[in-house]
Image (spheres, rainbow, N blue to C red):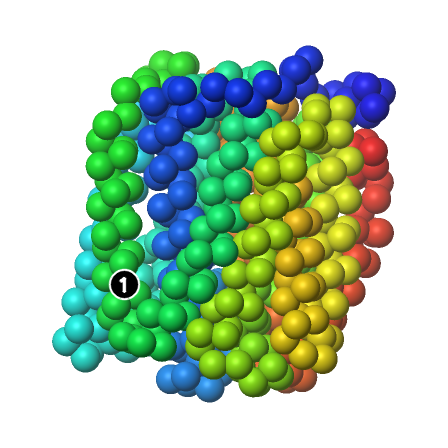
Amino acid sequence: MLRTARLAGLRLPRARPGSGLFALADFRRLWTIGLVLFAVRWLEMLVVGVFVYQQTGSAFQVALMTLLRMAPMVLFGPLIGALAERVERRIAQIGVSIGLLATAVAVAALAYLGRLEVWHLAVASFCNGIAWAADNPVRRVMIGEVVGAERMGAAMAVDVGANNASRMLGPTIGGLVLSSVGISGAFTISVACYVVSLVSALRLAHRNAVAPAAGGAVLTHIVEGLLLARGDPRLVAILTVTVIYNVFGWPFTSMVPVIGQDSLHLAADGIGILASMDGIGSFAGAIAIALWVRPPHFTRLYLGAVLSYLVLLIGFALAPHALVAGAALLLTGLANSGFSVMQATLIYLAAPAEMRSRLYGVLSLCIGSGLVGFLHLGLMAEAIGAPWATTLSGLEGLLAMALTWRWWRILI
């Protein structure tokens, strides 16, 4: 196992103690911000997906909403990473929280006035995507600086655990609220949650561990980050697997409302419960990682999680009824937790301290490659139906992993 860590070349800590994280006030605040952002994200993705499908009957337009959330990662990921090194991250986080709150207020107001249209949700999805692109280079870099490198793995497991807990609650609450009071009630919940996020951001005491960069062109910083990612075999391997996951794996979540309604014949509340199964599995996986996974296991867990995820999403797509589909989503959640925790942790440990925001910006760019995946899956779903399109996407992902063996084998 130790040989695995040496082969990967990562600066892994000797121990990974997870105790005492919540004794750190700023970690609690950053964790709370993440929990709120994650919960609202999953609630809105479910609610928007169901609303758009009911309005348009188009699986492609459902996928388009998630695609628009990811577009800013491709367009602005490296830029946000470079800019994050030039400002105090606390101030950046406050700005992100204000932007999210303003967007939610606007959508809720339009819904209450009865004037909400699909294009409004498209604009809101894009605006929220900018905040999503900023999460890694801003909030998660702050988490690493607050807890230190030795506890980064545990901190990421706890943070991803919050994400996954929200994936249990967000879709379920979203489905129930959409069924009972409509989309206006769902976005009212978003407004209340974003207020909590803003208050937590305002109370942050943390200041950048490395002083904000005072000089140098932003473009130069972006190029430096891209060149470092390209020149380090460890980073090439991690980011290659990230791209495959986001192009061929994760986009299948946009098809859950479509498959739930068309193939499994579920109502909005049933779709919400179905979608929450992925979160239950992910939450359990994150807890297991925080308790038992040690640094020598990091890279193999990362690879195994992606391979398992690609196989399991095929099982979901071909499930004959809701119980089997729910079980498949539960297992995809377990796999997703391994990928999510290790992705953020491995990048943090491999990056020089002064370039972590830039490399997290590059990571956001790679995550944003999912834009291609959502577009690809949406078009296939229009042509051959959501179940077969999802199946084909999983098979393509497994093929991509086989073809890129030469780059990621260093992680084994």
In this orientation, does residue 394 appear? Answer: yes
- In terms of image quadrants, where is residue 53? bottom left
Residue 380 appears left or right of 81: right
Report the front residue among 210 and 304. Answer: 304
User: Quadrant where the N terminus lies?
Assistant: top right
Residue at position x 42%, y 58% in the image: 170
* Position in image of residue 227 (x %, y %): 60, 30
- The residue that label 1 is drawn on is 187
Q: Is residue 104 above or below residue 77?
A: below
Quarter of the rendering containing residue 105:
bottom left
Rendered position, 132 above or below 86 = below
User: Seen in the image, is 125 located left or right of residue 62?
Assistant: left
Label 1: which secondary element: helix
Q: Which residue occupies 83% across, 33% down?
A: 412
- Looking at the picture, tell me which residue is in the foreground, 66 or 164: 164
Q: Which residue is drawn at 27% across and 63% down?
A: 187
Q: Nearer the viewer, residue 349 or 175?
A: 175
At 36% from the left edge and 77% from the top edge, which residue is drawn?
179
Identity of the amino acid at label 1? Phe
Residue 97 found in image quarter: top left
Q: Is residue 216 visible?
A: no
